Image (cartoon, helix red, strand yellow):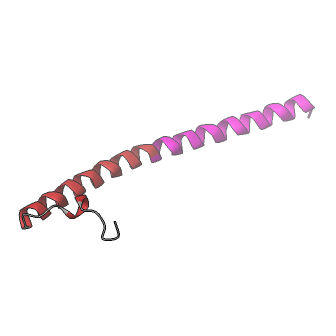
């Protein structure tokens, strides 16, 4: 096997690895977006629940006691 063939083989493996990693990153990005939307929805629901439970400022909007 010549040096050029070895380099071509290495490049082919690297390209396959890059493609596989790209697919993983794309899938993870979709999952992060989905989870972010769910967290936002849960935060809205919790804020509404806190507002309905009392007439105070929701805990998420209050300053921590050390401020």
Looking at the image, residue 59 sits to the left or right of residue 54; the answer is right
**Rendered location of residue 50, percent (x, y):** 13, 64
For the record, the magenta segment spans 1-28
Q: Nearer the viewer, residue 46 or 65?
A: 65
Q: Nearer the viewer, residue 57 or 3?
A: 57
Magenta stretch: includes residue 10: yes
Q: Quadrant of residue 13?
A: top right
Magenta stretch: includes residue 64: no
Quadrant housing the N terminus: top right
**Rendered location of residue 51, percent (x, y):** 10, 61
- At a point 80% along the width and 31% down the height, the residue shown is 8
- Outermost residue toward the bottom in this view: 65
- Outermost residue toward the top in this view: 4
Taken as a whole, is the magenta stretch helix, strand or loop?
A: helix
In the displayed structure, 5 sits above or below 40; it is above
Quadrant housing the C terminus: bottom left
- Outermost residue toward the right in this view: 2
In the displayed structure, 40 sits above or below 17; it is below
Q: Nearer the viewer, residue 66 or 18?
A: 66
- At a point 30% along the width and 71% down the height, the residue shown is 65
In the displayed structure, 17 sits above or below 56; it is above
Looking at the image, residue 23 sits to the left or right of residue 56; the answer is right
Looking at the image, residue 56 sits to the left or right of residue 34; the answer is left
User: What is the count of numbered marks?
Assistant: 0
In the displayed structure, 16 sits above or below 64; it is above
Q: Quadrant of residue 56?
A: bottom left
**Rendered location of residue 28, percent (x, y):** 46, 47
Q: Quadrant of residue 64?
A: bottom left
């Amino acid at each position: 096997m010549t040096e050029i063939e070895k380099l071509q083989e290495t490049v082919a493996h690297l390209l396959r690895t890059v493609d596989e990693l790209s697919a993983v990153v794309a899938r993870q990005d979709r999952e992060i977006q989905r989870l972010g939307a769910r967290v936002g929805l849960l935060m809205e629901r919790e804020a509404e629940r806190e507002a309905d439970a009392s007439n105070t400022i929701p805990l998420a909007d209050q300053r921590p006691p050390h401020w």
